[in-house]
Image: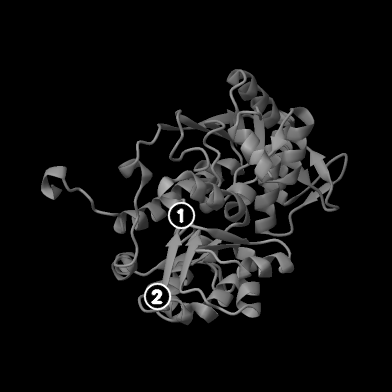
Amino acid sequence: MLVIAPKRVAEDTWPKELAKWDHLKGLTYSLVMGSEKQRREALQKRAFLYIINRENVAWLVDNCRWNFDTIVIDELSSFKSSKAQRFRALKKVRPLVKRVIGLTGTPSPNSLIDLWPQIYLLDMGQRLGRFITHYRERFFVPDKRNREMVYSYKPREGAEDRIYELIGDICISMKATDHLNMPPLISNRVEVSLGQQERKVYDALRKDMIVKLKDGEIDAVNAASLSGKLLQMAGGAVYDTEGRTLRIHDKKLDVLEDLIEAANGKPLLVAYWYKHERDRIQERFRVREILTTKDIDDWNAGRIPVALLHPAAVGHGINLQQGGSTLIWFGLTWSLELYQQTNARLWRQGQQHAVVIQHLVTTGTHDEDVMRALERKDMGQAALIEAVKARMEVSYEQTA
């Protein structure tokens, strides 16, 4: 069996979970990671499981003899792009595999378009078609576009229900709240207010897409760039045209300081998005970023009072629930997948306390747009999860 997972999950979570459960202690594993020499040596070892990070999948397919008849893809949604090298590599050997098991908490983080590559790896196109172009034409119509360029698609009338019906026999969802004794989850918005001068700069950039400051110039060349610049500015700093960090305000840092003081020593996890957010937090507070296995172990052991993380680095599969129960979003992300997966580092099985998610939202800025977008995407994904939900409402008397 080949297990494919994000790098940190492959080298940390899978080995620890295999050692933790009594019924898995007979299983041997080999980590196919490191240098090419180390990967080849790992493949020569006799083991039940061979665990590899997803970045090495293409290397494995192109350079080694394929002898796996079962694949487990941990975080299947990381194969949601049909153009990605990892998807194309796995597609080559898919006919040689008897069974594929995909695991994900975010099957359609942006839209139902994301489903096609994932389902293809499960059934080789039996349910949603062999080509993504046919899938799009059958179930979707163009949504946002600029002349001939289509930026997004929306489902045709009745398409959602039809897609759910087609994949229902090979997909199953089990929500933690339905089957596990999960702790309470509390989600808060902590409002951050700009001063008159900062508001003037923010509004000028939003209106004119360019603003001159004492230390440099901020220029948004297009709408996507403007979105990023406005989010940065809501956080307190922004990159100028030369790539330098221009400080605008410390409003979020001030609020974060209040939250750290209010925690009174209780461990806090702080999520950032831009590097200058991390740098400014590290400059002001005594914090430690979670990057390595030792960082994860120290956090879970309670040795890190305030920890920093980037959602893309540890947003999937890492167990952090033993070290704390409060997450603060200093910088927000448009990605529902990374947002939900990061929250799930604390709100998961084994958490002993109520989990509190704090969002630092600068009022009247792009922060509010991001929060609305996340809520809207969440509603769409929730419909898919509900459609393939495990129906297990059977009493013990009936099964006795």
- 171 horizontally vs 358: left or right: left
Q: Which one is nearer the viewer's eye here, 378 or 341? A: 341
- 322 horizontally vs 169: left or right: right
In x, y percent, where is residue 64? Answer: 63, 78
Residue 164 occupies quadrant? bottom left
Q: Residue at x 37, y 52 (%)?
A: 382
- 154 horizontally vs 277: left or right: left
The circle on residue 399 is none
Q: Is mark 1 on a helix, strand or loop?
A: loop
In x, y percent, where is residue 292? Answer: 68, 45
Task: Identify whether 210 is placed above or below 356.
Answer: below
In x, y percent, where is residue 31? Answer: 61, 60
Task: Identify whether 308 is placed above or below 51.
Answer: above
Residue 94 in view in this figure: yes
Q: Residue at x 60, y 77 (%)?
A: 61
Residue 330 in view in this figure: no
- 346 horizontally vs 260: left or right: left
Type of amino acid at the residue the image marks with label 1: Gly
Q: Which residue is drawn at 67% across and 70% down?
A: 40
Residue 63 occupies quadrant? bottom right
Task: Identify whether 223 is placed above or below 66.
Answer: above
Q: Name the residue under label 1.
A: 26
Mark 1 vs mark 2: which is more N-terminal?
A: 1
- In the rendered image, the residue lying farthest to the right is 215
Q: Mark 2 points at which residue?
A: 123
Q: Neighbour class for label 1 at 10 Å: few (<14), some, many (≥20)?
A: few
In x, y percent, where is residue 315? Answer: 57, 48
Q: How far apart are marks 1 and 2 (CA)?
A: 30 Å
Q: Which one is nearer the viewer's eye here, 46 or 216? A: 46
Q: What element carries label 2?
A: helix
Residue 123 occupies quadrant? bottom left
Type of amino acid at the residue the image marks with label 2: Asp
